[in-house]
Amino acid sequence: QFMILEDSRGQVAAVIKSRCTHVPSMVVYSTKRRFDGQVPSGHRLTRQVIGAGSGSGDNDAHANGGSARARKSMAVVIDENNNHGMFMEGEPLYPWALISKSGRTMEDDCMVHLVNDEKVGKKGSAGTGSYSSSSSSSSFGGIFHAKPSFCGRHGFDRELHTHTVVSRTMATPCEETSMDSGIGGNTNTNSSVSLEEAVLPSVPCCVIVRDPSNYDAVDITIAPGIDPLLMICYLASHAKMDVEPLMSGF
């Protein structure tokens, strides 16, 4: 359910959670606030110590000439919602982006909706979270922008997936307002534009090319000013959402 991305030093960079929806979608969590005052999610990051072997500490010491066996720690995510509301120690995780596909096949586009700092709970004077009443009507859970910030699409050569192009979407203020109204359902539906119907101008910002000799290896080229970690999270999410419908069996 959770995918944890770590760097070469074992530091957690981001966490991705599958939403288990019919049309695949993922939520990306950051270990850092995306804006001042952002309230953490109900998920927390902690580390679980795993021993190199079984047995007591004394046995480990004897087996290693008086020194305890090396132990490693593994990053795990704990869900506060499944812990009966009890407070848990651990590093907080903050919503960063919703990544969703427009369908269930590899040919379908994949969109990235960044967290909306105007609709996410912020800490008040007492340190508690308060939420905008307009957020409840959003089809994206109320905390993500209705307009996608990025849109990705696979490229194929004779039905073989060869590359993926991610583009930064752009829209005029009128277009953004129209789409927010249509998806949120707060205004006249006759003037609304659905996300599927809207054609957003976009500029390519990331190209992911697969190694023909090693399908699990890719070459990524990212334009200046684009967050590399977000593009890596996109790649991991898109790849997982490609196989989720096949694994579900329907």
Image (spheres, grey):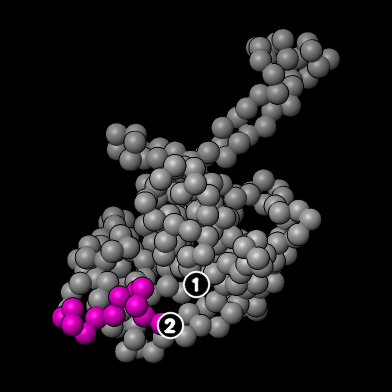
Find disc 1 in the rendering and name its residue.
Answer: 151
Q: Main secondary structure of the magenta part?
A: loop
Q: Secondary structure at mark 2?
A: loop
Q: Is residue 152 magenta?
A: no
Q: Quadrant of the C terminus?
A: top left
**Residue 63, can we see it?**
yes
Q: Position of residue 161 (x, y in %)?
A: 63, 62
Q: Residue at x 32, y 89 (%)?
A: 174
Q: Is residue 98 among the parts visible in the rendering?
A: no
The tag on residue 107 is none
**Along the horizontal axis of the image, is 90 left or right of 187?**
right
Amino acid type at mark 1: Cys
Determine the image quadrant of residue 233: bottom right
How many numbered marks are there? 2
- Dot 1 surroundings within 10 Å: few (below 14), some, or many (20 or more)? many
Of callouts 2 and 1, the N-terminal one: 1
Name, please, the residue furthest toward the front: 158
Q: Which residues are magenta?
A: 188-199
Position of 64 with respect to 41 (left or right) is: right
Q: Position of residue 164 (x, y in %)?
A: 61, 68
Q: Which residue is mark 2?
A: 200
Q: Is residue 193 magenta?
A: yes
Task: Assess whether mark 1 and mark 2 are in contact (beta carbons under 8 angstroms).
Answer: yes
Going by the picture, which residue comes out furthest to the left? 188
Determine whether 228 is above or below 192 in the image.
Answer: above
Q: Residues within 10 Å of mark 2 (few under 14, many from 20)?
A: some
Residue at mark 2 to residue at mark 1: CA–CA distance? 9 Å
Q: Position of residue 134 (x, y in %)?
A: 21, 69
The reply, left or right, for residue 154 in relation to residue 64 is: left
The one nearer the camera, 83 or 25, is: 25
